[in-house]
């Protein structure tokens, strides 16, 4: 008789079906309310990073295409702004409802195009994108209440550039407040993840948004740079790396064009000895391994109070061993594919530099598919504050562990960064959390949680993490002229 001495928890594969997804083979540029062939742009395939297979051909906008997009946006702007706010709100409500109706398809396409686990695109990206449109639909007829009762007018035509880590969600963060305020918008998705923005263009058509109010113009950095140089744009909103943000700021210097920048980060996640440690470990995992660490506010610098450092590292390593890495379309997957070959190279190079500088590396053992771009969740200990892995944004599933003795030391070390996007504080003392939060230079600070997003709350950075806020009433301000 065999005696069962141990329960073995195994998962059977649970892949999400892609049968219901009806992608076109070829996507044009969305300009003037219709999909058009590029005038001087070109077509490029978009690749599934988990399989390296092409998914569809996508048109990339050239300068003549961008001129056409600006012309269409300018032509539509005054009529859009002249609509009563409640009418603009109705369009945004419609877009939000259509995102909900197509949620399953959007989630699958987001996962195929970007590599993130389906569990995340289904439970976070898509519902939050709809929530952003709902939220700003509600603001469309209450704009002056959002700015202290003052008079408001739209900026005009806005140019918006987003990165690849939350493609649909970043598009919603940009478009929803801009449209609510009466602007027309030209959105450029990132080169590796244009598909959900193009599905959003279909939704915009279905919502019968007046032609020209939104243009979606995929392309790479050259398209982005050309959009920044385009004549006839009144305001720019950029989310991406600090380096590109700096170039855009320089290109717009001296021009009467509004600018908001949501840039990179190297956020501190601080664990005090009085924290609920098991809960903190879950928060650390969510803080750095969510979306493969491709998160601007990822808790990539983990500060642990010395008295509990060994215990937390042991618990964390044990918990990391249970992360499931692999097929992003599998509903059990925790960590999916790295977004592109270039990003994988960047992560590998920075981690190698960390090891050369003396950090001790532990990566979990995992079987990953033969093709695709993968990086095992990694823990770096023996990290000093001057190491590159403690200073530079890795933008991958890699956490650098540092320690501190006192609260003052934790604050000083956390603030010792050129970035200031987010932070996490783990303690069971409310007063301590408030005291530390008020001393941290970070735009968003979570207490006993991490990576918690809400459309009603402002998000944005300090220092080289950028300026301007997205979300909540604060997110209206960059899209309005206030008098
Ligand atoms: P990136 O700066 O390389 O690209 C971002 C976007 O800018 C893409 O659409 C790209 O095509 C475009 N672009 C590239 N060069 C350009 C140029 N010269 N002019 C105009 N546009 C140009 O960044 P990425 O690698 O796509 O994204 C990762 C970065 O984004 C990370 O640094 C991350 O922290 C940051 N990010 C910040 C936030 C935030 O809210 N603060 C959110 C998500 C991502």
Image (tube, grey):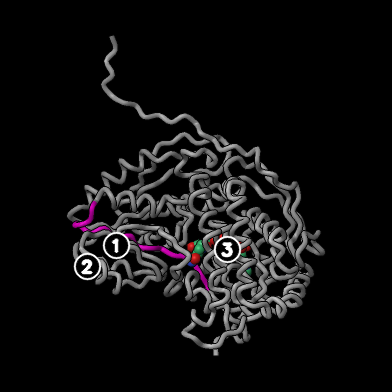
Q: Which residue is drawn at 55% across and 86% down?
A: 482
Density class for disc 1 (Cα within 10 Å; few <14, some 14-19, many ≥20) is: many
Q: Is mark 1 on a helix, strand or loop?
A: strand
Assess whether residue 94 is covered by the magenta stretch: no
Report if residue 244 is visible in the image. Answer: no
Q: Which of marks 3 and 1 is nearer the N terminus?
A: 3
Assess whether residue 270 is covered by the magenta stretch: yes
Quadrant housing the N terminus: top left
Q: Mark 3 points at which residue?
A: 172
Assign ligand 1 to one image quadrant: bottom right
Q: Which of marks 3 and 1 is in front?
A: 3
Res 425 label: 1
Point out residue 49 in the picture as x, y percentages from the top left corner: 59, 45
Res 253 label: none
Highlighted magenta segment, given as a residue range: 261-276
Q: Name the residue under label 2.
A: 432
Point out residue 270 in the picture as x, y percentages from the top left corner: 29, 60
Say whether residue 263 is left or right of residue 34: left
Point out residue 354 in the picture as x, y percentages from the top left corner: 39, 54
């Amino acid at each position: 008789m065999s005696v069962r001495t141990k329960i073995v928890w195994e998962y059977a594969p649970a892949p999400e079906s892609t049968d219901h997804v009806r992608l076109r083979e070829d996507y044009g540029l969305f300009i003037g309310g219709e999909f058009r062939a590029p005038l001087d742009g070109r077509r490029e395939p978009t690749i599934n990073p988990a399989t390296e297979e092409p998914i569809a051909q996508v048109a990339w906008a050239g300068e003549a295409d961008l001129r056409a997009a600006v012309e269409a946006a300018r032509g539509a702007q005054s009529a859009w702004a002249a609509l009563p706010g409640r009418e603009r709100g109705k369009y945004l409500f419609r877009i939000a409802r259509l995102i909900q109706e197509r949620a399953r398809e959007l989630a699958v396409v987001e996962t195929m195009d970007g590599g993130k686990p389906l569990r995340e695109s289904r439970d976070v990206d898509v519902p939050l994108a709809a929530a952003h449109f709902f939220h700003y639909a509600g603001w469309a007829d209450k704009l002056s209440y959002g700015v202290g009762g003052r008079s408001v007018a739209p900026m005009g035509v806005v140019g918006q550039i987003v990165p690849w880590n939350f493609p649909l969600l970043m598009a919603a963060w940009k478009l929803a407040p801009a449209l609510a305020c009466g602007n027309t918008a030209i959105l450029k998705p990132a080169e590796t993840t244009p598909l959900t923005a193009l599905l959003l263009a279909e939704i915009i058509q279905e919502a019968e948004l007046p032609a020209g109010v939104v243009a979606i113009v995929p392309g790479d950095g050259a398209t982005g740079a050309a959009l920044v140089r385009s004549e006839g744009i009144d305001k720019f909103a950029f989310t991406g790396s600090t380096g590109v943000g700096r170039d855009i700021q320089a290109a717009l210097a001296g021009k009467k064009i509004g600018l908001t920048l949501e840039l990179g980060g190297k956020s501190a996640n601080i664990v005090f000895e009085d924290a609920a440690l098991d809960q903190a470990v879950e928060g650390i995992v969510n803080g750095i391994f969510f979306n493969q660490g491709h998160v601007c506010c990822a808790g990539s610098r983990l500060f642990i109070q010395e008295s509990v450092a060994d215990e937390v590292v042991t618990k964390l390593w044990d918990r990391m061993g249970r992360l499931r890495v692999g097929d992003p379309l599998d509903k059990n997957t925790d960590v999916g594919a790295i977004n592109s070959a270039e990003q994988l190279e960047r992560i590998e190079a920075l981690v190698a530099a960390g090891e050369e500088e003396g950090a001790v590396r532990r990566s979990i053992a995992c079987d990953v598919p033969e093709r695709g771009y993968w990086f095992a969740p990694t823990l770096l200990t023996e990290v000093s504050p001057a190491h590159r892995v403690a200073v530079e944004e890795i933008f991958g599933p890699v956490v650098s562990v540092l320690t501190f003795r006192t609260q003052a030391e934790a604050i000083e070390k956390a603030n010792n960064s050129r970035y200031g996007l987010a932070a996490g504080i783990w303690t069971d003392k409310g007063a301590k959390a408030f005291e530390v939060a008020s001393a941290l230079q970070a735009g968003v600070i979570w207490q006993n949680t991490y990576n918690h997003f809400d459309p009603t709350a402002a998000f944005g950075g300090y220092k080289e993490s950028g300026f301007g806020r997205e979300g909540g009433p604060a997110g209206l301000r960059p899209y309005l002229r206030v008098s």
